[in-house]
Image (cartoon, rainbow, N blue to C red):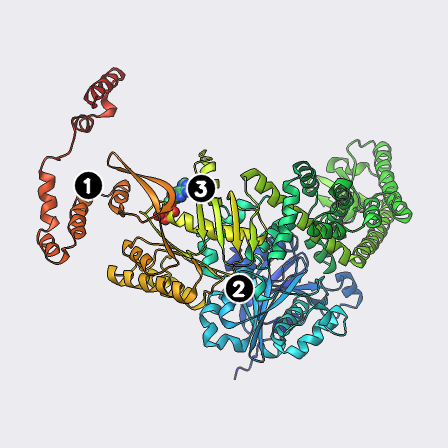
Amino acid sequence: MNDHSPPAPSPVMAQYLEIKEANPGCLLFFRMGDFFELFFDDAVAAAGALDIALTKRGRHDGADIPMCGVPVHTAEAYLARLIRAGFKVAICDQIEDPAEARRRGGKGPVRRAVTRLVTAGTLTEEGLLDARRHNYLAGIAEAGGEIGIAWLDLSTGDFALAPTSEPALAADLARLMPGELLLPERMLTRPALFELLSEWKPALTPLPNPRFESEAARRRLQEFYGVGALDGFGGFGRAELAAAGALVDYVGLTQQGRAPHLQPPRQVMPASVMQIDAATRRNLELAATLAGERKGSLAATIDRTVTAAGARLLSDHLAAPLTEPAAIAERLDAVEFFVDRPELREVLRERLKRCPDIERGLTRLSLGRGGPRDLAALRQSLGETAALRDMLAEPGLVPLPERLAAAQRGLGEHGALVERLRRGLAAELPLFARDGGFIAAGYSDELDEWRGLRDESRRMIAALQARYAGETAIGSLKIRHNNVIGCYIEVSANHAGKLGPEFIHRQTMAGAQRYTTAELADLETKIASAAERALALELRLYEDLVGEVMARRAEIAAAAAALATLDLSAALAELAAEAQWVRPIVEEGTGFEIRGARHPTVEAALAGEGRGGGFVANDCVLGDDRIWLVTGPNMAGKSTFLRQNALIAILAQMGSYVPASSARIGIVDRLFSRVGAADDLARGRSTFMVEMVETAAILNQAGPRSFVILDEIGRGTATFDGLSIAWATLEHLHEVNRCRTLFATHYHELTALAAKLPALACHTMRVKEWKGDVVFLHEVGAGTADRSYGIHVAKLAGLPKSVTARAEEVLSVLEKGEQGGALARLADDLPLFRAARRSADPVPCESAAEALLRDTRPDELTPREALELIYRLKALAPQ
Ligand code: ADP
């Protein structure tokens, strides 16, 4: 044993270690004055992630303590980066004034405590969130053999839960895209969930199993909402409750007991939304493109909302299309109302543009994390509600469609609060209440009085400076202020001798001397105490205003939701009008009749390139013929056609107009796609394996109300293998799944099935051959493609001529069908030698014009020679 055991840690370090131990799994932001400091391993990790200097401070256990720090006033930016990098952070603040600590007699360090845990799913700050997307904290739990999922957005108070199941979980998570996912530790070891959970690894927060106990969860929820039973909110299963309870518990933990504003939980039954698995969402580029960007996704293409809350509602609706015709029609009625009234739509949208986000501000205020600007946002947005309400109450507009009538009621009546905020808040507002100066003049007599005193004293100081300058005959004498010594009189060093005895020396600077006088000290005290009292009073008034807002938070939340609904309805109408979309008819049944349909993003992209109107519209009618087998060469538009029909189903069921001339859709309960897979090397799967996994999911799960698009199947293996799999898949879809299907293939052999399978119809992408070239018409028509034109596409792509010529040769042998012997002969005639021979031959098909061009060196031509060349070329052209 060492005789010299290391010295005990300093009191601050002891305090640090104790708090650190109580918050495992988090980086500890330890407040020291104007900095948050991190020590030990935390410092090393944070310095690396933030790219800031790692230093040391003191010693512990005989070694240097690594340390890094970030300034408190810029901490948010650093927090954002740490959270994005997957860390959780415990914020440890000083909970007493250092001056108070000194008054305590200097016993022990300033009191500190963790005031909040910052985790990816519990963010509320504007700077840490994407304004246009919800950031969900989700939880899964199991009870009695069932699985439940719950999710909430702490920054808006949205809270929901749903029963689910092991196989459905992946689609649920893909729909919600939670920023953080809580789950009991024991679920981590379930083999069936292993792969799914490893996909969500960065977002996972496993917690001890008892936190997911359903009875405790019920009690916690009842307590949170102050109700004796939860039945009023819905009939929840145990597993759902367990998940929801764990969320509320976790929110309490991360917010250190402060109660945020949460809407009562709403139950989302799985059958009430269209089930779309993760691969399909990705493939259809609903929320992001395959490259991971929002730009170019369906969400970005259709988003015309003018408020952040409207945009969030749009992404929620797009992520979860409905399956109830009546509910869909209700949404569509609201959109139609605004389609029919372009002028009303325009003025409404102008007003909405002036409504800042209040949902998130409301939560910040309820967590004690808000500021004067959140109040100002409320003043602004709630101030607009009256005009919006009146706008919708015009006699010609009633009765409003149900959804809009509900929104109009939801806007509520906030006149008194708005008036109070208008009177209370100044024009210019600081970010934090503690900075003061945000209460308007004239709001509180007492505050005006303290401010008057403070300002008066300031004027007196200015007068004092003038007087001293006169009395001492030092024109450059100044009275200044700094945070270290307060107010002082400064004269340059050469004037120092001219001052009388009432000037008490304070500081010697390079070239200047600083003094004070009894009179100045007296004035300074008056200013300080007036300013201090003014600030204290302002903070009290601020709390009063916040209190008033909190007392009305249910009404304000309802108004916020109403604003989002109005924004989204008007935005979808704007889109429909602008892009000439139509209202779909969505009904029970399994019909699917879309006429004149377009692909929204491809059409928008063509328009963006100045080729508006360049998109060729197509029909898709699935009735007795449930399955369309679509053949056609590469690049002819098969994928586009398949996808546009899936997207139209999604758009229609989310309650949007659709890019078509008419659309009648029997409810799609599940949407599947198998399109353009890529290798998933991270998971050790080849393209073919990914393709087969996706196909298996479809064949195992699709039912008669499902809609399936399959784009090329069996490509990644040998031809006969692939063809056989495609063949059997098609039969299974026809006989067993009996779902609506669009099946694109380049295996023309499959068209033979049309004779055998009554619900199968063959369609093809029309192509025109013109002077040896292939022109894709992008038109879908009945029938089958006679050729693949693969070699044409290869030529277009620039494959060497020798390769495409050889391919044509091989193809013609294969097409004759005498494959065995002929192929062997072809193989004997090795192209290696042929290619060499060929390149020695004069290129057989070169024309005189081509030869002329080959020998031309453009850089060496004079303008005159260039003109002559054109004449010569013209002479060579066939007449
Ligand atoms: P395939 O699946 O048959 O290989 P794609 O659907 O990928 O073909 O289409 C290839 C390209 O053709 C698309 O990127 C798009 O620019 C264009 N295209 C497809 N369909 C149409 C259409 N209906 N109208 C105009 N252009 C289209």
Quarter of image, ligand 1: top left
Residue sitting at x 69%, y 63%: 93
Which disc number belongs to residue 617? 3
Tell which tag, 2 or 3, sits nearer the viewer.
3
- In this orientation, does residue 291 appear? no
Q: Is mark 1 within 8 Å of ligand 1?
A: no
Image-quadrant location for residue 136: bottom right
Relative image position of residue 871 (x, y in whole percent): 23, 17
The secondary structure type at the circle numbered 3 is: loop
The secondary structure type at the circle numbered 1 is: helix
Q: CA distance from mark 2 to mark 1?
A: 49 Å
- As shown in the figure, which amino acid type bears the numbered disc 1? Lys
Left or right for 872, reference 380: left
Q: Where does the C terminus fall, quadrant-wise?
A: top left
Give the residue at mark 1.
801
- Going from N to C along the chain, the mark reached first, 2 or 3, is 2
Q: CA distance from mark 2 to mark 3?
A: 34 Å
- As shown in the figure, which amino acid type bears the numbered disc 3? Ala
